[in-house]
Image (spheres, grey):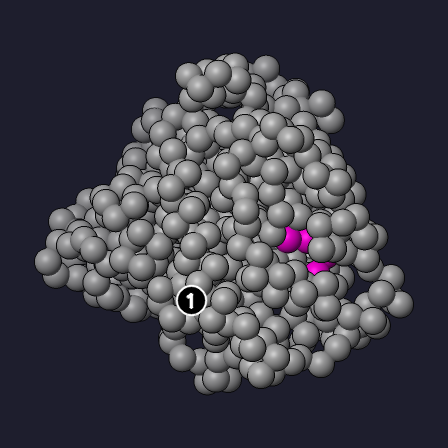
Amino acid sequence: MSYPRDPKSRSLPLRPLTRRRFVMGGLAGLALTACNSGSSNRNADGSIDDPDLTPDPMPEPEPIPDTEVPGPMMPRGLHASLVGDSHTSRAVTWFTDGEDAPVSWLEYSSFDIGLDEFSIQDDGFEFSVEASTMETTGIESFTHRANAEGIDPDRPLRYRVGSDEGGWSPVYVIMPSPRDEWSFIHFGDHGVGELPQLVTAEIMRTPADLLMLAGDLSYANGDQPIWDLWFEQMEPLLARRITMAAPGNHEQKDFGGDAFKNRFTHPDKPLSSPFGSGDLGSAFYSFDFNRVHFLVTTAGALIEDGTLPEELINIEADLANAALRRLRGEIDFIIVMQHFTIWTDQLDRSPANFTLVALEENIFIRYGVDIVIVGHDHVYQRSTAMALGLPNPLGYVQMLVGTGGASIRLFDDNGPQIWSESTFVGIGFARYVVSKGKIKIEYIAAPPMDMSDLGRQYSEGIFEVQDSVEINAKSLLACSQCAMPARGPETLMQNFEAIAAHTRHRNRHALKHCG
């Protein structure tokens, strides 16, 4: 539990306002605008009004170095997420190295917009909560997680993590979640090379209140220090924006997905006990952000952990409940995120896992899912509203954004299928601006140097809006038709042996064609 702190207790020591601190002093103001969902400085054609904002391979802004308090077990890899209400809670996860784990803390305070940078960085903290600690999977480190609850929903949050014994992180700021218009960014298939860092740098310059990562994040593939490098590169972004992630097939190669579950903090499974099971690293979960309900699934990426039957029952129950809540007017949209596509036109990625896809699509259509956001295929492809691979105004829109920079792929020579409405080859991300009853989507991307095998390994990083679309909430009649009772295991599991066999085959096929 959290409790008030003496503002003078464990506060950062006052330091002179050095030239470095003076130069960086504008970063607080930048954070207050760059992480908000207000208007972007990007024009409709993707250009940027400020000519000084040219692409940069490294994320900006960087943490201010002299806000750290050095120690032998320094916190690293900070990232924020949600396990509770999107307005009044923030979870933070981080790591420390060594054979022993310090008793670590999350210290935090809300503050008024306009507070000067010096005070943001150096004032004491009003609240503190002790972190839970566990060994980090596959490496001699510790994972710490803590949840700040009951925060002021209308003011920014400043925080740091660590301990007097081990050292303290820089002070970071997370903006409050807007209640009316807000935005989120979605992409998958990232990594640690130059292309991923171009994407990260552009996202740092693009307003958003939430990040949704659709799997295949670090490409550690069992080499756990690569996870540490990925979090080091991503900390300037993930420590400032709420981030929710799904596992991909490459996460399966990290101890069967255990590294993913260990390193991220997510809500519990939808059908968990009301008292909670403490499974804050769940790989499938759901949450609300204002009037949007998100369900995150594994789509069988971690099938060897034995939880796919439980997950399918959870998907059915969660979406049935969401459809009923939408009919009652509590939410406007239902969005599902997973790594694997439902349909695809990327070269060498067919055939899909038809049995699992058939069951998933049956569930999505039954309960009127609005958007399915995915990765896996290293291309961009937006569908029209569709069902069963055919255009259908009552179906869902699939947003395939596997363009986080892991590699740049090509489309099948046969051309797009009838459901496909827009495609792009390159690197980039989708930004969704959500208001009551409406979601405006822009795909922001940069092309490769050229389409040759060598040229597709590089990009000049000139990002522009390549595609846009607007999606409206379903009508009351459509919502009423989707408010149906959840089905039981006898229906969902009747073909599970084939689903499991085909899912394993698909996963092997996917890894075979990863490059």
> In which quadrant will I find the N terminus?
bottom left
Image height check: is 435 above or below 489?
Answer: above
Image height check: is 105 above or below 320?
Answer: above
Q: Quadrant of residue 258?
A: bottom left
Describe the element under mark 1 as helix, strand or loop. loop
Could one spot residue 499 in this view of the protein? yes
Range of residues picked out in magenta? 369-373
- State the image coordinates of residue 151 (x, y, percent, origin top left): 51, 64
- State the image coordinates of residue 348 (x, y, percent, origin top left): 50, 37
Q: Residue at the far left: name it.
A: 99
- State the image coordinates of residue 48 (x, y, percent, origin top left): 63, 22
Left or right of 239 on screen, residue 360: right
Q: Is residue 260 magenta?
A: no
Image height check: is 326 above or below 382?
Answer: below
Q: Residues within 10 Å of mark 1 (few under 14, many from 20)?
A: many
Residue at the location (64% across, 37% down)?
A: 381
Residue at the location (50% across, 84% down)?
A: 274
Left or right of 15 on screen, residue 487: right
Residue at the location (50% across, 44% down)?
A: 376
Left or right of 44 on screen, residue 381: left
Q: Nearer the viewer, residue 382 or 296?
A: 382
Q: Nearer the viewer, residue 125 or 57?
A: 57
Residue matched to label 1: 282
Left or right of 248 on screen, residue 151: right
Q: Amino acid at mark 1?
A: Ser
